[in-house]
């Protein structure tokens, strides 16, 4: 009897040894995502896989069992590359938390860019929830080319160093210069300033000419020429929401070979979106380096003090006071309240688009999704919090305007590919592939939906269950993980 027991013990012991040897021969990952539906838009993988994450990178994608320090059961969920937003204006952690719940792992301020690039990047170092970055701000670089604004410029620098940089702060500081025409010397200085800020890490150049619509064609053309020579990507809010402005931008890009990204085609083209899409397609066929994006809402949002509301706005935007909603109260405006708020300044929501126009942009596989999310305020435009979940919940699941894989490409691979020639680290993002950065968004495709609304303001989206940024979990079981700041700077290729 004893002998028999001894034999069993030996067999058991050697089995254990064998298992141990086996386990030791396999790599141990930091995190293993078990059994999710993995979608990679580049390799077209759409299958159940386990993913091993090690040192901030995706180290294994496998049908085999993987061993890790932390196992996360993601069965029944979609495992996608982290969502990339090329167009945000809210860039503090307060806005980043809304973005995180909407599945973002990278949020970039590219339409406007930021002032004092180097100081701004420094101010966000080791503090960000998700990856961050910004373009060089052309309105700021022209502002500081003018000697008369020297003092205001110094104040703005101090503000940036103290970590208080914001779009509205910038706007209020430099707005006074929007009507100034640059002399030849100032224009040259502006280009030198841009060059310097690109060397500080700016991702291309933000040219929101729509806010400085009186800018000389010569000045704008000089920026395009510079961008063409240096192959710097331009991000443009066009001069006006009409087809002439598309023609101006496309002509400039064609003649100078400047790479061009037109922001929010939905609010730039309005009812002419089909023509705008056709023009972009035709330009591409002729070798123009051009792309565009949209947000999934029938309303826009901006500052009421901006030039967009200069004399004649009703005709330009084909609307009236009642189309405008004041974010602080939710009220629709009248002539009286419009005049009052135009003096005080602040954010307004502009209800001026039709659902059919959005559908045309959404159906076009080349149109990326970007939120144009505004800084936090009680009733900020819902796009700040809900853009990406709305595309996946409303446009994919409910309305079936596009399929899940196409939608994922629009919010991951397409923006990564668009940016990788100007920001090389984007080569490692927007993909679920071995060697790629472990920026991963895991969501429930049956539940994902936006919760922010025009009536109630911002709210976290639902259905995003886990978000991993550079290998660190920032969202777990739908909740923010506190005390972790894995967001890294995304910088342009000219960074010295
Ligand atoms: Zn804009």
Image: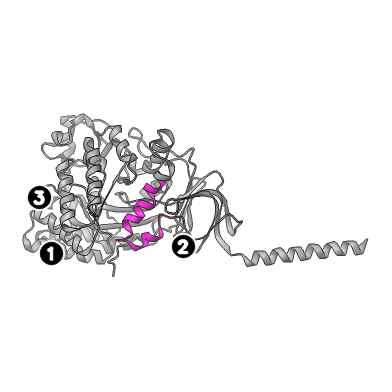
At 59% from the left edge and 59% from the top edge, which residue is drawn?
Answer: 68
At 14% from the left edge and 48% from the top edge, which residue is drawn?
Answer: 248
At 36% from the left edge and 59% from the top edge, which residue is drawn?
Answer: 426
Residue ranking furthest to the front: 285
Q: Quadrant of the C terminus?
A: bottom left
Image spot of residue 477 (x, y percent)? 52, 46
For mark 1, give the secondary structure. helix
**Magenta stretch bounds:** 408-432
> Which residue has dot 2 on it?
435
Image spot of residue 284 (x, y percent)? 25, 51
Badge number at residue 189: 1
- 3 or 2: tag closer to the N-terminus: 3
Can the viewer see residue 405? Answer: yes
Badge number at residue 267: none
> Which residue has dot 3 on it?
179
Image spot of residue 237 (x, y percent)? 21, 47
């Amino acid at each position: 009897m004893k002998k028999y027991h001894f034999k069993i013990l030996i067999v058991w012991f050697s089995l254990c040894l064998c298992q141990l040897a086996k386990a030791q021969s396999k790599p141990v990952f930091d995190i293993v995502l078990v059994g999710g539906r993995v979608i990679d838009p580049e390799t077209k993988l759409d299958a159940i896989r386990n993913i091993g994450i090690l040192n901030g990178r995706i180290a294994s994608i496998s049908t085999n069992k993987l061993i890790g320090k932390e196992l996360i059961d993601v069965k029944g969920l979609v495992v996608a590359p982290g969502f990339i937003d090329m167009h945000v204006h809210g860039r503090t952690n307060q806005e980043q938390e809304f973005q995180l719940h909407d599945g973002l792992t990278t949020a970039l301020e590219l339409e406007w860019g930021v002032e004092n690039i180097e100081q701004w990047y420094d101010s966000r170092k080791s503090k960000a929830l998700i990856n961050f970055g910004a373009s060089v701000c052309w309105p700021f670089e022209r502002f500081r080319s003018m000697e008369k604004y020297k003092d205001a410029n110094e104040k703005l620098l101090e503000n940036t160093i103290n970590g208080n940089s914001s779009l509205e702060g910038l706007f209020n500081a430099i707005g006074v210069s929007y009507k100034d025409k640059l002399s030849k010397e100032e224009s040259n200085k502006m280009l030198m300033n841009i060059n310097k800020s690109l060397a500080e890490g700016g991702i291309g150049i933000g040219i929101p000419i729509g806010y400085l619509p009186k800018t000389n064609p010569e000045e704008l053309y000089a920026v395009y020429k510079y961008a063409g020579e240096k192959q710097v990507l331009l991000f443009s809010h066009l001069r006006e929401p009409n087809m002439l402005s598309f023609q101006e931008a496309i002509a400039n890009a064609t003649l100078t070979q400047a790479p061009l990204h037109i922001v929010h085609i939905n609010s730039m083209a309005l009812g002419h979106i089909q023509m705008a899409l056709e023009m972009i397609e035709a330009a591409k066929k002729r070798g123009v380096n051009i792309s565009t994006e949209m947000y999934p809402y029938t309303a826009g949002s901006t500052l009421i003090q901006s030039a967009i509301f200069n004399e004649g706005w009703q005709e330009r935007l084909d609307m009236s006071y009642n189309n405008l909603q004041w974010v602080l109260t939710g009220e629709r405006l009248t002539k009286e309240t419009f005049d009052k708020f135009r003096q005080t300044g602040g954010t307004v929501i502009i209800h001026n688009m039709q659902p059919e126009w959005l559908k045309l942009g959404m159906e076009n596989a080349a149109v990326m999704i970007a939120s144009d999310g505004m800084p936090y305020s009680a009733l900020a435009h819902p796009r700040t919090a809900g853009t990406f979940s709305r595309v996946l919940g409303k446009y994919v699941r409910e309305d079936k305007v596009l399929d899940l894989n196409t939608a994922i490409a629009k919010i991951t691979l397409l923006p990564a590919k668009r940016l990788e020639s100007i920001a090389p680290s984007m080569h490692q993002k927007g993909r679920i592939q071995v060697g790629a950065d472990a920026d991963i968004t895991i969501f429930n495709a049956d539940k994902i939906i936006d919760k922010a609304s025009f009536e109630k303001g911002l709210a976290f989206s639902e259905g995003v269950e886990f978000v991993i940024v550079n290998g660190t979990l920032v969202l777990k079981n739908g909740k923010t993980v506190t005390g972790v700041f894995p967001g890294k700077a995304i910088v342009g290729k000219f960074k010295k």
